[in-house]
Amino acid sequence: MAETETSRDAAELLQRVHAGDVRALARAVSIVEEGGAAAADVLSAAHALRGDGSAVRIGFTGSPGAGKSTLVDAYARLLRAQGEAVGIVAVDPTSPFHGGAILGDRIRMQASYSQDDGDPGIYIRSVATRGMLGGLAAATADICTVIEASGKSRMLIETVGVGQDEVEVARLADVTVLVLTPGMGDDVQSIKAGVMEIADIYVINKSDREGAERVESEILAMQSLAAKRGAWTPPCIRTVATTREGVAELDAAIARYVAHIQAGGGLTARRHLLKQGRPAGAAMRLDRLVLDHLGIAVKSIAEARKFYETLGLHIESEETVEHEQVRTAMLPLGETRIELLEPTAEDSVIGRYLAKSGEGVHHIAVHVPDIAAAMAAMQSAGVRLVHEQVKTGAGGHRYFFVHPASTGGVLLEVVSSSKEGL
Ligand code: CO
């Protein structure tokens, strides 16, 4: 955790960011990376300074070895020559900590800018922390917001590969560039379903190599099969990033796409659309959430189990959780379970619930792969939690509760297994 910043400290820090203080920017990004209350203060100060966000976010994704870093480097230099201020965020979710392979390149690149060019109009940041899994795309978006507050007009977001996390990161960009190469097993067919569709623009990099024609015709064939997506057909641009060949054409294609989406409501509207379906802006890994159980408060497990047994269910495990003063019985039901909760004391959470509301559904529980990340994502999204620390329950499983005020009136338990997500 970063040291606590009051919102006034955050506003002052962001004023320095806005004035071009690079150290202040690095610190502000670090605070946002770490999450929590201080991050929320820094973000709201960044939002205030950035206004409606006129920066264009351009995502570069594609298989490792496609030359994305070189392409991003060449494109950043072109943008600088046009007078744009550029932020680069390099995302490597496979790296357990700062310092993955992608970052070595970036450090050299930053050095080349600051030594050769002495250029304050470019800022490079890497995102590679394991703790962000579950909220990597949201964290990357937040980092972009902070960098944009320093006056950057173009954000280039580069991912190391095309895994699920990286596709989500690519989707947060206004423009997504999918970088392919001829040959090298990089056939269009080998790119997973769901990845080709995210491209607004295809780039065939290293197109001086043999096979560029074939990749392009494969893309065109695939496009003719796919349903037309609005009025935009993603163009296919050939580049040789090492010689900057085709980079101006890529820039022109990006400009055409930006004009296209601005005609259809603009970048802000698109960002809003992309965020729909994600809880409070925190890009939780919905594909990996499962309904773990339904908790039902009952006066007596011995009485209540009779009904469920006539349904054909059976009690798989039964135990008393002393510190919650509750006895629980778990009954598997399809992919999920019913949890019967019987108070062991009248003055307990379940005892008081029964006295007030009678028997009934008490909570629903979702299982997440990484509970610390889930809690951090919810905290930074301003979700109200019943307790701000992950607790350990029976069998070593970990859990916390989300207040009904944030969920539409249902007490929500978030659980993970004992050895997962650490
Ligand atoms: Co429960």
Image (cartoon, helix red, strand yellow):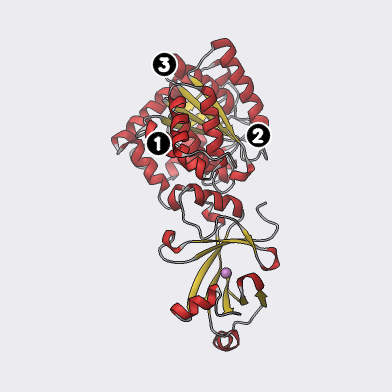
Distance between mark 3 and mark 1 Cα atoms: 23 Å
Residue that mark 3 sits on = 83
Residue 44 screen position, x and y as percent:
42, 39
Mark 1 falls on what kind of element? helix
Q: Residues within 10 Å of mark 1 (few under 14, many from 20)?
A: some
- Please report whichever mark, 3 or 2, sits nearer to the chain's N-terminal start: 3
Determine whether 405 is above or below 377 in the image. Answer: below
The x and y percentages for residue 230 are 34, 42
Residue identified by numbered label 1:
47
Residue drawn at the location 64% of the way across and 29% of the way down: 103
State which image quarter holds ligand 1.
bottom right
> How crowded is the residue under tag 3: few (<14 C-alpha within 10 Å), some, or many (20+)?
few
Q: Which residue lies under the disc numbered 2?
A: 98
Using the image as rendered, state which of residue 355 and residue 57 is in the foreground: 355
Tell me the quarter of the picture where residue 45 sits: top left
Could one spot residue 28 in this view of the protein?
Answer: yes
Count of residue discs: 3
Badges 3 and 1: C-beta atoms under 8 Å apart? no
Observer-nearest of 344 and 264: 344
Residue occupying the point 31% across, 34% down: 262
- Residue 267: mark in rendering: none
Give the amino acid at mark 2.
His
Residue 227 as seen in the image, left or right of residue 325: left
- In this rendered view, identify the residue nearer to me: 240 or 112: 112
In what element is the residue under mark 2? loop
Q: Looking at the image, is mark 3 or mark 1 earlier in the sequence?
A: 1
Mark nearer the N terminus (1 vs 2) = 1
Q: Amino acid at mark 1?
A: His
Amino acid on which disc 3 is placed: Gly
